[in-house]
Image (cartoon, grey):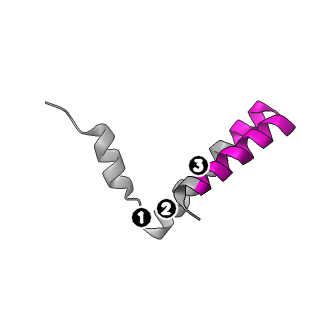
Amino acid sequence: MSNRQFGFLVGFLFIWLVASQSFWVALAALLVGLIGYGAARVLEGDLDLTELTDRFTSSRR
């Protein structure tokens, strides 16, 4: 499955969840999914939290 197909599937499922439940339920599901995705990237070693915090806290001159 390509990234484009996966993005379409995720978008389709999100709209289906909005239509069948409510906007807030779909938004909560999306937020929990993003948190899970981030946690999986950290556990797999694909995301370095120190690099991420340095990007947002570094002083610009």
Query: Which residue extends farthest bottom?
Result: 44
Query: Which residue extends farthest left?
Result: 61
Residue assigned mark 2? 41
- The residue depicted at 24 percent of the width and 39 percent of the height is 58
- The residue depicted at 21 percent of the width and 35 percent of the height is 59
Q: Which x, y percent locates residue 11?
A: 66, 44
Image vertical order of residue 25 relative to residue 6, above or below: above
Q: How many marks?
A: 3
Q: Which x, y percent locates residue 39?
A: 54, 58
17 or 32: nearer the viewer: 17
Crowding near pointer 2: few (<14 within 10 Å), some, many (20+)? few
Image vertical order of residue 24 relative to residue 41, above or below: above
Asked whether disc 1 touches disc 2, contact meaning CB atoms under 8 Å apart, the reply is yes
23 or 52: nearer the viewer: 23
Residue assigned mark 3? 34
What SS does tag 1 mark? loop
Give the Cα distance between marks 1 and 2. 5 Å
Nearer-N-terminus badge (2/3)? 3
The N terminus: image quadrant: bottom right
Residue assigned mark 1? 46
Give the Cα distance between marks 2 and 3. 11 Å
Q: Which x, y percent locates residue 31?
A: 63, 43
Give the Cα distance between marks 3 and 1. 15 Å
Query: Which amino acid type corresponds to the residue marked 1 in the rendered image?
Result: Asp
Asked whether disc 3 touches disc 1, contact meaning CB atoms under 8 Å apart, the reply is no
Image vertical order of residue 18 relative to residue 53, above or below: above
Image vertical order of residue 21 relative to residue 37, above or below: above
